[in-house]
Amino acid sequence: MKDNGYLIFKDFKIPKDALLCRYTTITNEGEVKSIGDPKIAYSVMLQIRCNLLKYGWEGLFKMLVIR
């Protein structure tokens, strides 16, 4: 079972300390600032995608053998 959905909040404010922002911050003026090098974040994302392709076939073949 999948639960997919969305919520729309109008004129709703969240305190800054409640946001889970590890690599971004929001200034008091409302500007969004990135922390760190975006090239590193991109390289990590690319590495994870490569690992999914590299090791994902093992689960597929195990599933085919079990069936």
Image: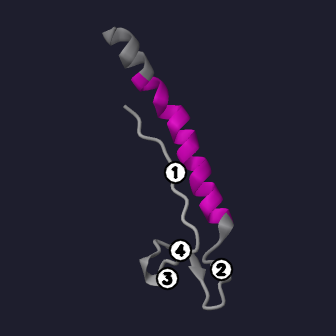
Relative horizontal placement of residue 39, taking residue 59 as reference (left or right): right
Marks 4 and 3: which is nearer the front? 4
Say if the magenta span includes residue 56: yes
Q: CA distance from mark 1 to mark 4?
A: 15 Å
Q: Mark 1 or mark 4: which comes first in sequence?
A: 1
Residue under label 3: 16
Q: Amino acid at mark 2?
A: Lys
Give the SS element for disc 4.
loop
- Please rate how many residues cluster around mark 1, counting C-alpha atoms within 10 Å: few if below 14, some from 14 to 19, many from 20: few
* Spatial CA span between label 1 and label 3: 22 Å
Residue type at tag 3: Lys
Q: CA distance from mark 2 to mark 1?
A: 26 Å
Residue annotated with mark 1: 6
What amino acid type should be assigned to the residue bearing mark 4?
A: Phe
**Quarter of the view holding residue 38:** bottom right
**Dot placed on the residue nearer the N-terminal end, 1 or 3:** 1
Q: Secondary structure at mark 2?
A: strand
Q: Quadrant of residue 26?
A: bottom right
> Which mark is nearer the camera, 4 or 2?
4
Rendered location of residue 33, percent (x, y): 65, 79
**Residue placed under numbered mark 4 in the picture:** 12
Q: What amino acid is at disc 1?
A: Tyr
Looking at marks 4 and 2 on the same chain, the residue that comes earlier in the sequence is marked by 4
Farthest residue, direction bottom = 28
Q: Which residues are magenta?
A: 39-59
From the image, tell me which residue sits under label 2.
33
